[in-house]
Image: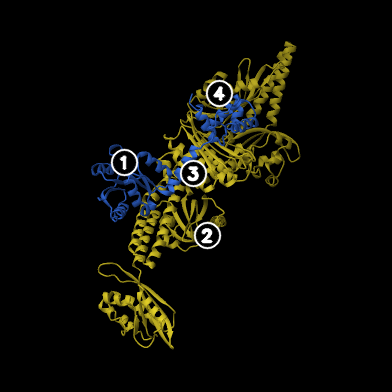
Chain colours: A blue, B yellow
């Protein structure tokens, strides 16, 4: 069985050396090329067509996300495994959107890189377990935002209050605009939220958005 | 273990012990009291044989001390030390002796530790000498030291002074810190008690911060304090502090920045104010300063005279004591507006010591040092003139209706009144002449406008406010033409509304002087009506507030620059932490892992390596948290939506409070960087407040683009508070947080409001325009 051909891109030589040593120590893998910025990684990987590119996210010049996107466009058979020092979930989403098949934190590289390379080479995807938990829970949360119940009948006033609240107005401002008291606004708000099963201001905004009430005039 | 001599039995447990010792990887030898080798294990024999001619002799029968004493060359020093230690152990001077020494072979670097202990046998003494290979540990230590060196290199390159303390003692300082405090170098600082670096007046406060931080009670992460240089000179600093726990010890890292220049500028401002105060001591206005609770701090001679108190009596009073209680109830002193930087011009009755009341015009504002200041002018005379004037007018109107014949006489009366009023004005103006230089409230002029003929009668001070000579004519048309075109419609509308609503006219606007200067003025007035309710005339005053506006703008600009510089510095350090240090930590961790893979299960080496790996892992996490706390790279790389979403999730996890985050019209697009930064910081502060105060069970964060503005709402269902009274109360902390948030929004032309009530949760509303409109009109 032939070895997995791995390409390494990282702007820090010391990290690159470590990655190479680690990969080359595996009986079923070999490093076939390396680059120290995104542009070189893209050009070289296009020519070498490795099975997996281990791509640092933050590199000077063309960054990892852009190099990943280009590689995915031009040679979709090359699997990209993103490697980063950033633990923010936002980078993960950016890289996955760019087409990376896996995402490994540098902190855990010794434990996970080899497994991740094998996984993505076999066509799977691999995300650092600590990050994966966060991503999943935030998707679940976004998905179950309240207010999916059928539209209950709102009175005209309730609808006015809801629209204004969704536009980011305070109770005091709503009261002034509708020429009613702040207490009345509060009462309307509690009632309309109950009717629609909304639990927070974020729910109110989402509801208004679905009703098409937030389109600009 | 091969033995020589008489000791040692032949029982089974003993054989087992010997077998065990024989299998150990440490090199072990037993010596008698003269240093002769009595027994050695296999590891010792193998090592001695493989190593060198000198050590080969070190098997049973040889004399260890003699071999040590004979050593020459590079090993001689270590051999001598071991021999001395061995003699000390055998002689009973010490119980144990150990020495780490290098023993490099031509092909690889190696280190050993030699240990000597003693035991008694049949009345005689035996020494046990062991040598163990500690090369892996040494190498790992060297790498760690190197990474520490790099950490220090970054710290020493920092322009900020950085100090690390533990148990109130300095363990590390960078060059900038030493330079700042006048020490020859960081090494001079190490071991110092931290209080040596703080001016005596701040020492107690800072030590308390440190103790609170260690006990987990929390202390401000950023604050100003006065440091003490080595020569005793004071030093104004801004500190930002973080704590790190490594291997059970808590280290406090303080980064300081010299703000002496800023303080000097503030001091210069205060001094010029002090000069002003000197001038004002002789001024015709009463002047006093008071703190946020209303306690009077200073008062000038004129005020004492006006109120009939001695200065000492006044200093024991609260400003509220000067106002009749029944007036205070309907028209409380507006500390909130003063604290938000507004200058308030009001008229109210004041009570003298003898209980009598008099009308006063009060102009209050907050000084840059946070103290409130008020100018008080006794307007009894002006009131009398105004009243007389009004009476005269009313009288006139009545008479006009009754008998036209009396018009001429009444007119004479009016003319006389006006003349008298002008004389009063002139005297007033003369005393104002001196004030003009120091008083930011500028010249006060009065005017009246006939609403039927639209004829304007302006005092010389009003003319001066419009840049006209005293004898020039100033018509209503001249006034309207001089008002800045952008402000004109607003001023006219304000006047029309005041007349229609029978309310007060108040407008703040720019005028262009004939010489091209632009000045800011405030006008206030009130219309008079005939018995049928038709408006007759409007009387009012106009004050030049240009200097005050300029001072406000300068302060705002200064603040903006400060905030920008702070963000830039945070961004720089955060990047450095990630890109330099973070990458090297990664390499270090890979190295450690490789080492442990190569140590083939040797317990002693593995334990050390595992501890080092855990330490490196901790450091990496700390580093990430530190950089994230300073300024998350995502804010620059990925934008507000992502950065805030990340922050909110982190927050929710730590606070164990669910957060419902929603953003629309923002994701996928970048806003101006300063808007993104401001909204991020405001949301961060608001969420910090929620955590500290609210006890909320649910939080909602909404970020929307609505037309040409971005709206952020941070809402919780916690216990809430009375937002108005909090802003008025003298309690600091949370209020300052709110003011800081408001200031941050205001810098970008935005607004911030808070809606809350006891038990009703709290909502913070921020609005920032995307295309800031030019010249905020008042």
Q: Are marks 2 and 4 in contact (CB under 8 Å)?
A: no
Q: Is residue B715 left or right of residue B565?
A: right
Task: Give the CA separation, mark 3 to mark 2.
Answer: 39 Å
Residues beneath discs 4 and 1 located on the same chain: no
Q: Which residue is mark 4?
A: B490
Task: Give the CA separation, mark 2 to mark 4.
Answer: 58 Å
The quarter of the rendered structure image containing the N terminus of chain B is bottom left
Tag in front: 4 or 1: 1
Percent coordinates x, y for residue B665 in the rendering = 46, 32
In primary-sequence order, the first of circles 3 and 4 is 4
Q: Which residue is mark 2?
A: B195
Callout 1 crowding tier (Cα within 10 Å): few <14, some 14–19, many ≥20: many
Q: Chain of mark 3?
A: B
Q: Are marks 4 and 1 in contact (CB under 8 Å)?
A: no
Q: Chain of mark 1?
A: A
- Is B50 situated above or below B357? below
In primary-sequence order, the first of circles 3 and 2 is 2
In primary-sequence order, the first of circles 2 and 4 is 2
Q: Which residue is mark 1?
A: A67
**Is any part of residue B287 visible from this angle?**
no
Q: Which residue is mark 3?
A: B649
């Amino acid at each position: 069985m032939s070895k997995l051909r791995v390409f390494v891109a990282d702007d820090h030589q010391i990290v690159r050396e470590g990655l190479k040593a680690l990969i080359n120590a595996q009986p079923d893998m070999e490093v076939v090329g390396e680059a120290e910025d995104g542009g070189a990684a893209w050009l070289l990987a296009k020519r070498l067509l490795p099975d997996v590119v281990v791509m640092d996210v933050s590199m000077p010049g063309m960054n990892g996300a852009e190099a990943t996107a280009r590689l995915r466009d031009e040679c979709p058979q090359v699997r990209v495994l993103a490697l980063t020092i950033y633990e923010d979930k936002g980078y993960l989403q950016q890289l996955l959107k760019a087409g990376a098949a896996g995402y490994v934190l540098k902190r855990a590289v010794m434990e996970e890189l080899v497994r991740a390379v094998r996984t993505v080479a076999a066509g799977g995807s691999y995300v650092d377990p600590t990050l994966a938990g966060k991503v999943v829970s935030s998707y679940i949360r976004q998905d179950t935002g309240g207010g999916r119940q059928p539209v209950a009948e709102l009175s005209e006033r309730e609808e006015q209050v809801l629209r204004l609240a969704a536009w980011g107005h305070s109770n005091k401002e709503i009261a002034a605009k509708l020429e009613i008291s702040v207490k009345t606004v509060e009462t309307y708000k509690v009632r309309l939220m109950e009717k629609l099963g909304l639990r927070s201001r974020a729910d109110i905004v989402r509801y208004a958005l679905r009703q098409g009430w937030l389109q600009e005039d | 273990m091969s033995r020589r001599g008489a000791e040692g039995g032949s029982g089974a447990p003993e054989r087992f012990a010997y077998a065990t010792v024989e299998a150990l990887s440490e090199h072990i030898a037993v010596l008698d009291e003269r240093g002769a080798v009595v027994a050695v294990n296999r590891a010792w024999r193998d090592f001695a044989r493989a190593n060198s001619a000198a050590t080969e002799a070190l098997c049973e029968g040889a004399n260890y001390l003699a071999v040590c004493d004979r050593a020459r060359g590079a090993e001689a020093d270590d051999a001598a030390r071991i021999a001395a230690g061995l003699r000390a152990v055998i002689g009973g001077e010490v119980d144990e002796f150990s020495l780490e020494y290098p023993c490099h072979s031509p092909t690889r670097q190696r280190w050993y530790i030699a240990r000597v202990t003693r035991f008694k046998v049949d009345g005689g003494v035996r020494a046990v000498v062991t040598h163990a290979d500690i090369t892996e540990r040494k190498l790992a230590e060297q790498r760690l030291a190197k990474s520490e060196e790099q950490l220090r290199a970054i710290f020493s390159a920092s322009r900020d002074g950085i100090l690390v303390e533990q148990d109130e003692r300095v363990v590390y300082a960078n060059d900038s810190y030493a330079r700042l405090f006048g020490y020859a170098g960081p090494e001079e600082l190490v071991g110092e008690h931290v209080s040596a670096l703080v001016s005596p007046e701040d020492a107690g406060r800072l030590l308390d911060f440190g103790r609170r931080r260690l006990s987990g009670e929390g202390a401000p992460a950023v604050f100003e304090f006065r440091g003490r240089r080595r020569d005793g000179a004071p030093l104004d600093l801004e500190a930002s502090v973080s704590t790190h726990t490594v291997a059970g010890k808590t280290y406090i890292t303080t980064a300081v920045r010299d703000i002496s220049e800023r303080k000097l500028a503030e001091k210069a401002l205060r001094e010029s104010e002090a000069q002003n105060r000197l001038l004002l001591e002789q001024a015709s206005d009463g002047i006093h300063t008071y703190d946020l609770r209303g306690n009077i701090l200073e008062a000038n001679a004129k005020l004492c005279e006006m109120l009939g108190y001695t200065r000492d009596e006044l200093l024991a009073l609260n400003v509220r004591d000067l106002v009749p209680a029944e007036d205070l109830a309907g028209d409380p002193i507006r500390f909130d507006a003063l604290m938000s930087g507004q200058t308030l011009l009001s008229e109210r009755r004041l009570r003298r010591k003898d209980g009598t009341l008099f009308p006063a015009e009060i102009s209050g504002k907050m000084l840059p040092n946070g103290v409130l200041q008020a100018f008080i002018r006794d307007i009894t005379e002006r009131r009398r003139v105004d009243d007389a004037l009004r009476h005269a007018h009313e009288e006139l109107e009545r008479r006009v209706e009754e008998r036209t014949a009396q018009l001429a006489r009444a007119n004479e009366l009016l003319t006389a009144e006006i003349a008298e009023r002008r004389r009063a004005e002139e005297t007033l103006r003369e005393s104002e002449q001196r004030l003009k230089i120091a008083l930011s409230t500028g010249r006060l002029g009065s005017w009246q406008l006939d609403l039927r003929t639209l004829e304007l009668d302006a005092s010389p001070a009003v003319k001066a406010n419009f840049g006209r000579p005293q004898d020039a004519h100033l018509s209503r048309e001249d006034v309207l033409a001089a008002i800045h075109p952008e402000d004109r419609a607003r001023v006219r509308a304000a006047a029309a509304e005041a007349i229609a609503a029978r309310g007060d006219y108040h407008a703040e606007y720019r005028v262009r002087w004939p010489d091209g200067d632009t000045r800011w003025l405030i006008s206030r007035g009130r219309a008079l009506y005939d018995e049928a309710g038709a408006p007759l005339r409007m009387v009012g005053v106009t004050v030049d507030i240009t200097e005050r506006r300029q001072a406000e703008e300068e302060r705002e600009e200064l603040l903006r620059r400060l905030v920008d510089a702070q963000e830039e510095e945070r961004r720089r350090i955060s990047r450095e932490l990630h890109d330099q240090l973070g990458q090297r930590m990664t390499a270090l961790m890979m190295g450690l892992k490789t080492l442990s893979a190569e140590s083939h299960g040797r317990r002693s080496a593995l334990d050390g390596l595992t501890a080092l790996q855990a330490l490196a892992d901790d450091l990496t996490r700390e580093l990430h948290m530190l950089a994230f706390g300073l300024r998350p790279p995502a804010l620059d790389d990925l934008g507000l939506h992502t950065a805030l979403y990340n922050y909110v999730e982190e927050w929710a996890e730590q606070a164990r409070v669910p957060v419902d985050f929603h953003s629309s019209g923002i994701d996928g697009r970048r806003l101006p960087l300063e808007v993104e930064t401001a909204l991020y910081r405001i949301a961060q502060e608001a969420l910090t407040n929620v955590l500290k105060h609210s006890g909320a069970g649910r939080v909602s964060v909404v970020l929307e683009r609505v037309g040409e503005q971005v709206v952020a709402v941070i809402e919780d269902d916690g216990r809430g508070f009375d937002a108005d009274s909090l802003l008025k109360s003298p309690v600091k902390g949370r209020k300052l947080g709110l003011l800081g948030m408001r200031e941050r929004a205001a810098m970008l032309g935005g607004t911030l409001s808070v809606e809350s009530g006891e038990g009703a949760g709290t909502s913070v509303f921020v609005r920032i325009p995307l295309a800031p409109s030019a010249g905020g009109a008042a």
